[in-house]
């Protein structure tokens, strides 16, 4: 890694901007000179844009005609390590560098002067008069308002006028204070003692400490509740004690105040937060503090990976298998893999934590590329639940019923004993399909290749792909017959109906993301359930993530076969992970739990593996299959996604590409397709995909580059390369 150079005023510079120009442009260094990596403002045509000094200029453009950068921003220059990472990431993901740079320059108000600003926080008083608008303001403040909001920001988030906020200030329910724009972050104290660790935890923590200090990757595997978080917080402590910065990535949905509170309990102060719920002013403050080193620990969503840390010593990727780490729009990348790439540039330690690792990480550990640490049991007396299947071929299911007699009996028993049951169904809404019983027509989204899902709670049909909604029609849009449209199949809302019918006395809670107006309402509901405020909990995917319900001793999976349909080679892995995570909800405290899977194919190898408890055997078998097929992680894959308004030209182009695959054949790669992409139509645009399969060591990116060189896209069509696609 080379040291950054200094450029005297007037020297020729090469500046990279996030504008879609493709390459850095030459400028003259601004007044006072600047460092390599400096954030500068440069003229571009009639505009002024943000850029980063990428190195000495080398163009032959006439020096006399070269324009000068306008000014240097008063922030730390982008480090060589981060620039190297962005270049490598652009190469790897086959994305133009400016587009990747944009991920790292999301720094609102870079040029704002320091000074004071007014912020608004929660006060101690209840307002004398409560209105809906006032309640919304208070709700926003309670959910995310620790650091306070600007007036305009708060009003906008709550959907009220600024007058409403001012009114609350008068009544004392909201406090207005002046703070410096760049309020310092509270210091975290890494030397405060953590919890006394169990033997296994202490060993894992020791191994992490021993491998710190430079680049290394560790897979930390342990069932939910085994104390992975406790263990990696030890690694964070050591990193902070050495004066370096640490980053913990969480799936967005898991970014809760619960985790922040845990950090505060451990280190005596809150970390910096970076995700979509953080305000502009907070982002700006955190972004700067990363560069100056003033923030020690950042907890964030995947985009936190692009923050300009001064000295990044550790990156933790919690729930590393989570598919939300893959960004599927714009720059297509997997934050878990990019974390490893960044750490390699920055000389940081990486910890990948999961109860059910991705096959990629498992294989990397198996091959000795990653260190692997296992936390065997749950912490304390809690035990993993027993698991079993309910063979639905033997269950007498009534029409319109989804809970078989065996599961009904188990739930009944739990209610009698004052314990909780959870019924898991990974389908939001009332019914996944609405069909016309006169003509068989299924109501689909007008813009996507997806069926509309009935949501009774919203009284509308919803497209889960694009979010489009429409009222439930009276008459069939295809044959015009009225009164014949009927829901088919269960969603959680319909399951709730059945539960209410079967267990009228039981207290029911439905946890589905769309049933809650705010993150706070969902959180409150979870707390209430944890305290025993429900007998039966119905949940979608959101319940699979780390909530602790001490009284929960039964998990019933309504349709364990759901994820096994279709041709995706990752289906087994995904189902295994999801079922294991859900089952892990049962029996976290003293009571041993049981998880029962309703299935029509109890002999299916994946179902048997889920039950078997021998996870290593499952992974080994999955690995052997992938190896035989030459697919990731034992081979390489890339998707070429063509999108456009018309389907035929996309298929024509796809076929043309597939026929002219010389550069790919030369590296031994194969092309499959064109075929409709896994998501075949979104927001009115068709999506067609080609899949490329190559051997592990093959130079896939350069072959694709050569292959795609000079192709002409039809009008309105776009082409994106998806290296390491999620489904194949
Ligand atoms: P994981 O991250 O593997 O799900 P956690 O670190 O969240 O596990 O631990 C699960 C629960 O057990 C938490 O409430 C945690 O505080 C508690 N716990 C784990 N290890 C210890 C320990 N050594 N001492 C006290 N409590 C612990
Ligand atoms: Zn019809
Ligand atoms: Zn749609």
Image (cartoon, rainbow, N blue to C red):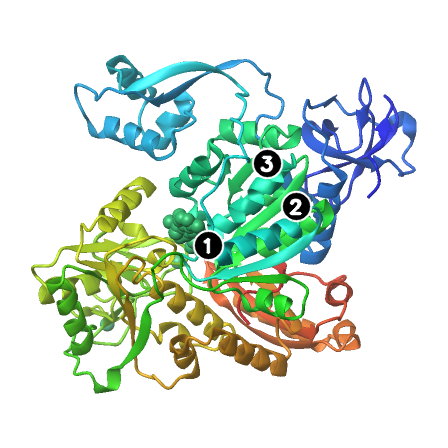
Q: Categorize mark 2 by other alpha carbons within 10 Å: few (<14), some (14-19), many (20+).
A: some
Identify the mark nearer the N-term, 2 or 1.
2
Q: Position of residue 413 (x, y in %)?
A: 14, 69
Displayed quadrant of residue 463: bottom left
Q: Which of 303 and 655 is in front in this view?
A: 303
Q: Categorize mark 3 by other alpha carbons within 10 Å: few (<14), some (14-19), many (20+).
A: some
- Badge nearest the viewer, 2 or 3: 3
Which disc, if any, is residue 117? none
Residue under the point 29% across and 54% down = 512
Residue position for label 3? 106
Residue under the point 61% across and 33% down = 290
Name the secondary structure under disc 2.
helix
Residue 130 in view:
yes
Displayed quadrant of residue 372: bottom right
Residue farthest toward the left in the current orientation of the protein: 505
Identify the mark nearer the N-term, 1 or 3.
3
Q: Where is residue 377 in the image (x, y as percent from the top left)?
A: 43, 63
Residue 277 in view:
no
Residue position for label 1? 198
Identify the mark nearer the N-term, 2 or 3.
2
- Ligand 2 found in image quarter: bottom left
Which disc, if any, is residue 99? 2
- Badge nearest the viewer, 1 or 3: 1
Name the secondary structure under disc 1.
loop
The residues bearing labels 2 and 3 have C-alpha atoms spaced at a distance of 12 Å
Q: State yes or no: discs 2 and 3 in contact (Cβ < 8 Å).
A: no
Q: Quadrant of the C terminus?
A: bottom right
User: For the residue with label 2, is its CB less than 8 Å from the closest atom of ligand 3?
Assistant: no
User: For the residue with label 1, is its CB less than 8 Å from the closest atom of ligand 1?
Assistant: yes
């Amino acid at each position: 890694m080379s040291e950054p150079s200094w450029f005297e005023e007037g020297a020729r510079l090469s500046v990279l901007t996030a504008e879609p120009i493709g390459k850095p442009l030459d400028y003259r260094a601004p007044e006072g000179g600047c460092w390599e990596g400096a954030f500068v403002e440069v003229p571009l045509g009639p505009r002024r844009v943000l850029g980063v000094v990428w190195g000495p200029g080398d163009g032959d453009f006439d020096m006399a005609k070269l324009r000068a950068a306008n000014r240097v921003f008063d922030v730390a220059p982008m480090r060589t390590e981060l620039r190297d990472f962005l270049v490598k990431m652009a190469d790897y993901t086959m994305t133009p560098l400016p587009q990747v740079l944009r991920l790292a320059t999301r720094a609102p108000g870079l040029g704002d002067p320091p000074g004071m600003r007014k912020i608004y926080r929660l006060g101690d008083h209840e307002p004398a008069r409560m209105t809906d608008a006032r309640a919304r303001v208070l709700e926003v403040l309670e959910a995310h308002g620790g650091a306070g909001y600007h007036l305009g920001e708060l009003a906008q988030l709550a959907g009220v006028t600024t007058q409403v906020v001012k009114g609350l200030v008068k009544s004392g329910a909201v406090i207005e204070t002046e703070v410096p724009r760049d309020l310092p972050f509270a210091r975290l104290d890494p030397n405060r003692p953590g919890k006394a660790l169990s033997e296994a935890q202490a060993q894992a923590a020791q191994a992490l400490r021993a491998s710190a200090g430079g680049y290394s990757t560790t897979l930390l595997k342990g069932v939910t509740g085994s104390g992975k978080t406790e263990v990696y917080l030890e690694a964070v402590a050591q990193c902070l004690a050495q004066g370096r910065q640490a980053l913990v990535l969480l799936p967005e949905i898991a970014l809760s105040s619960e985790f922040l509170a845990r950090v505060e309990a451990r280190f005596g102060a809150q970390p910096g937060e970076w995700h979509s719920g953080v305000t502009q002013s907070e982002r700006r403050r955190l972004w700067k503090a990363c560069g100056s080193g003033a923030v020690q620990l950042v907890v964030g969503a995947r985009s936190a990976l692009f923050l300009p840390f001064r000295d990044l010593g550790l990156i933790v990727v919690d729930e590393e298998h989570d598919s939300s780490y893959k960004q599927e729009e714009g720059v297509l990348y997997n934050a878990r893999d990019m974390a490893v790439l960044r750490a390699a540039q920055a000389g940081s330690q990486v910890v990948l934590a999961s109860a059910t690792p991705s096959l990629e990480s498992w294989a990397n550990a198996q091959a000795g590329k990653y260190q692997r640490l296992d936390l065997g049991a749950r912490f304390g007396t809690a035990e993993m639940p027993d698991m079993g299947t309910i063979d639905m071929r033997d269950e007498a299911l009534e029409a319109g019923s989804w809970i078989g007699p065996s599961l009904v009996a188990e739930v009944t028993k739990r209610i009698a004993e004052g314990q909780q049951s959870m019924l898991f169904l990974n389908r939001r809404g009332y019914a996944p399909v609405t069909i016309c019983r006169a003509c068989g027509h299924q109501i689909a989204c007008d813009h996507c290749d997806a069926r509309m899902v009935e949501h009774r709670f919203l009284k509308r049909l919803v497209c889960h792909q694009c979010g489009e909604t429409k009222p439930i029609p009276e008459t069939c849009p295809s044959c015009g017959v009225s009164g014949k449209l009927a829901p088919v199949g269960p969603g959680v809302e319909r399951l709730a109906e059945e539960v209410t019918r079967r267990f009228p006395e039981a207290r029911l809670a439905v946890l589905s993301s769309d049933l809650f107006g705010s993150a706070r309402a969902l959180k409150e509901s979870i707390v209430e359930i944890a305290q025993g405020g429900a007998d039966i909990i119905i949940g979608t995917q959101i319940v699979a993530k780390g909530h602790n319900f001490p009284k929960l001793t039964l998990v019933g999976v309504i349709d364990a076969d759901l994820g096994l349909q279709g041709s995706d080679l990752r289906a087994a892995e995904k189902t295994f992970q999801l079922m294991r995570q859900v089952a892990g909800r049962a029996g976290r405290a003293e009571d041993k739990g049981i998880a029962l899977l309703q299935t029509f194919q109890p002999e299916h190898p994946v179902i048997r593996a889920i039950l078997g408890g021998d996870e290593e055997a499952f992974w080994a078998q999955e690995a052997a299959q992938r190896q035989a097929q030459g697919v990731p992680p034992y081979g390489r894959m890339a998707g070429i996604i063509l999108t456009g308004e018309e389907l035929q030209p996309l298929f024509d182009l796809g076929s043309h590409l597939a026929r002219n695959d010389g550069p790919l054949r030369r590296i031994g790669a194969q092309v499959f397709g064109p075929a409709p992409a896994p998501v075949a139509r979104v927001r009115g645009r068709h999506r067609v995909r080609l899949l490329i399969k190559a051997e592990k060591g093959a130079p896939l990116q350069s072959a694709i580059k050569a292959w795609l060189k000079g192709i002409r896209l039809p009008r309105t069509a776009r082409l994106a390369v998806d290296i390491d696609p999620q489904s194949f």
